[in-house]
Amino acid sequence: SKTMRGVAPSAFGVGAFMETLCHIAFAYLGAYGNTQQQNSGGLARTVWLLTYMRSVFVHLRRSAEKRGKGAPGEGLHEPLRKALSHETSDLWAFPFEATAVFGEAPPAPP
């Protein structure tokens, strides 16, 4: 991997990112959620997180389309614009086809 002078490569991978998102969602629902959310288990909180993330993605895409007058993502950073250019059903279909969305499959776990 490429490194810039004086910058160490990141050791924060996809697994650590997902763990962090779940930790934040679990803590948020435990502290600020209603009674049902505070007493829910890990599966229900994970489903809430995925539902919330999909809702935010759909809202961001609609907002970008309104600002760009039909061209999603004009004026946005390239990775975000690329993600918004895909159909929502492609990103949330099961089983997830990473190659259809990102052009390459993620590496297999060790």
Image (cartoon, rainbow, N blue to C red):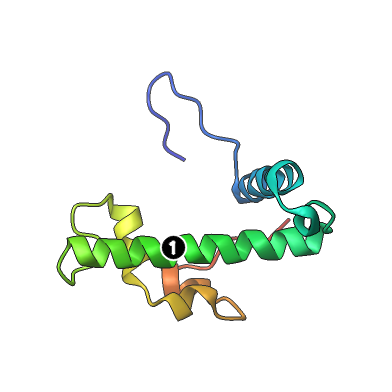
Look at 79% across and 59% down and name the residue there: 36
Amino acid identity at mark 1: Phe
Of all residues, the one furthest to the front in this rendering is 35
Q: Is residue 47 left or right of residue 68?
A: right
Q: Is residue 6 above or below residue 29?
A: above
Q: Is residue 37 left or right of residue 84?
A: right
Look at 79% across and 54% down and name the residue there: 35
Look at 17% across and 63% down and name the residue there: 68
Residue 99: percent from the left, percent from the top?
A: 48, 73
Question: Looking at the figure, which quarter contains the C terminus?
Answer: bottom right
Name the residue tied to disc 1.
57
**Camera-side residue of 40 and 110:** 40
Q: Is residue 106 above or below residue 15?
A: below
Of all residues, the one furthest to the left in this rendering is 69
Q: Across the whole image, how many numbered discs are drawn on residues?
A: 1
Q: Is residue 89 left or right of residue 51?
A: left
Q: Is residue 27 above or below residue 79?
A: above
Label 1 crowd (10 A; few <14 / some 14-19 / many >=20)? some
**Camera-side residue of 69 and 84:** 69
Residue 38: percent from the left, percent from the top?
A: 79, 51
**Camera-side residue of 66 and 75:** 66
Q: Secondary structure at mark 1?
A: helix
Q: Is residue 58 left or right of residue 30?
A: left
**Camera-side residue of 24 and 110:** 24
Residue 3: percent from the left, percent from the top?
A: 42, 31
Q: Quadrant of residue 53?
A: bottom right
Look at 66% across and 43% down and name the residue there: 24
